[in-house]
Amino acid sequence: MIYTPAEHADRYAELHPLLGEAFVALRSFDLTTPDGKIEIRGDDLFLNVERYTTQPAEDRRFESHRAYLDVQAIFTGRESIYVEPIERLDVTEPFDAERDVAFYTGPHETRLDLQPGDFAIFFPEDGHKPVCECGGSSEVLKVVAKVRI
């Protein structure tokens, strides 16, 4: 897991051949873009645009992905994302290859508080619980760059 302000993104571009391109797409994102999927390089790199109201952490669940890295970038609002290694979590829904997701339950002790300009990268071993309230509910615009591993 990597958590940092967006101005440091280029330091991580070498971790994957498409990560630099993902950062370029996030930097040029237009806030008026409607929710949904935006293909950059087909299924190898795309953006998911999401608008929602954050929820109490107790109402959310951990997830992880195997086929994609998640680069989660906040554009408006505030959100907490809890993170735990999947080895410390209990599987509630086994991995579904078609949806590229498994779900878990467990302690939510490590919290990242994201605000506009922040991003986090989640790897397959990073259980993450997104969409959580950060000091109260918030209307969020988040873009998730999905980078095929």
Image (cartoon, grey):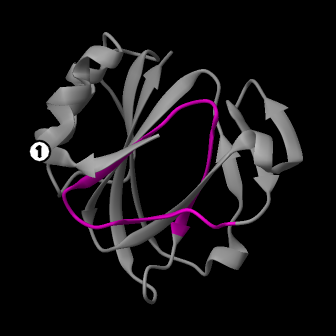
Name above or below for residue 101 compared with residue 72: above
Residue under the image location 36 percent in, 70 percent down: 140
Dominant SS in magenta: strand
Name above or below for residue 21 compared with residue 47: above
Depth order, front residue of 59/4: 4
Residue reaching furthest bottom?
A: 136
Task: Tell me the amino acid under the disc marked 1.
Answer: Glu
Q: Write down the region rendered in magenta.
A: 108-131
Residue under the image location 26 percent in, 55 percent down: 118
Residue under the image location 19 percent in, 57 percent down: 117
Q: Which residue is mark 1?
A: 7
Name above or below for residue 36 compared with residue 19: below
Q: Position of residue 125 (x, y in %)?
A: 64, 33
Magenta residue check for 111? yes
Magenta residue check for 119? yes
Q: Is residue 14 left or right of residue 8?
A: right
Q: Position of residue 31 (x, y in %)?
A: 17, 57
Q: Position of residue 143 (x, y in %)?
A: 34, 48
Query: Residue 135 lies in what quarter of the image?
Result: bottom left
Q: Residues within 10 Å of mark 1 (few under 14, many from 20)?
A: few
Residue under the image location 11 percent in, 44 percent down: 7
Q: Position of residue 68 (x, y in %)?
A: 53, 25
Residue reaching furthest top?
A: 17
Q: Is residue 50 left or right of residue 123?
A: left
